Image (spheres, grey):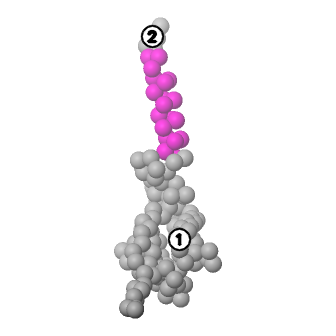
Amino acid sequence: MLSVRLNPWNEMYRELNRMREELEEFFGARTNGRRPTRESFPPLNVWEDDAGFYVEAELPGLSLEDLDISLTSDNTLVLRGERKEPQTGQGQWLRRERTYGRFERTVTLPGPVNADQVEASFKQGVLTVRLPKAPELLPRKIEVKGG
């Protein structure tokens, strides 16, 4: 006769792990970042200074031909592209944490942009977009005249 010892906590631990994985999948980078989702790819940094707004996107393994950048009339930067899935040949995956496929990220900027002077560069897998502020947003010195 086979005797199996049951631990009542095993099922609860399995269920908790399953729920944790689902929450990580749902919230993406807002949890511990171990499971990025299509909604959180590419990871972005966005900041501004007196002269303009800046957007950095991490795009490892992407070529410029697979990337489309546009600026809409409501000052929204749109990054679209596709990261192609690498082939393993005759091997099989042991772990897959990188996401593949089509992506789209949008960033609505807090002010108008001088669209004619937007610049983008792509170095070592990092896309940097510089969006100069429209003249009406730039700080200007006001001259005070004496009476």
Q: Position of residue 142 (x, y in %)?
A: 42, 86
Find the magenta span and give its range: 7-25
Tag shown at residue 135:
none
Residue 1 percent location from the top left of the image: 47, 7
Q: Extreme front residue here?
A: 147
The question of residue 98 being in magenta is answered with: no
Residue 53 higher or lower than 4, as above or below: below
Q: Nearer the viewer, residue 56 or 100?
A: 56
Screen quadrant of the C terminus:
bottom left
Find the distance from the CA under tag 1 to the CA under tag 2: 65 Å
What is the residue that sits farthest to the top in this orientation?
1
Considering the whole magenta stretch, tell me its main secondary structure: helix
Q: Secondary structure at mark 2?
A: loop
**Front-most of residues 49 and 143:** 143
> Which residue sits at x=53%, y=71%?
109
- Inspect the image, locate mark 1, and give the three-letter code of the amino acid beneath it: Leu
Kindly identify which residue carries mark 2.
3
Nearer mark to the viewer, of 1 and 2? 1
Whether residue 81 is visible to the viewer of this picture, yes or no, is: no
Q: How many marks?
A: 2
Give the label on residue 109, or none: 1
Q: Residue 16 in magenta? A: yes
* Closest to the observer, 131 or 124: 131
State left or right for residue 65 relative to residue 61.
right
Mark 1 nearby-residue class (10 Å; few <14, some 14–19, many ≥20): some
Secondary structure of the residue carrying numbered label 1? loop
Q: Taking the image as drawn, is residue 76 in sight?
A: yes
x, y percentage for residue 26? 54, 47
Residue lying at 52% horizontally and 42% vertically, measured from the top left: 23
Identify the amino acid type marked 2.
Ser
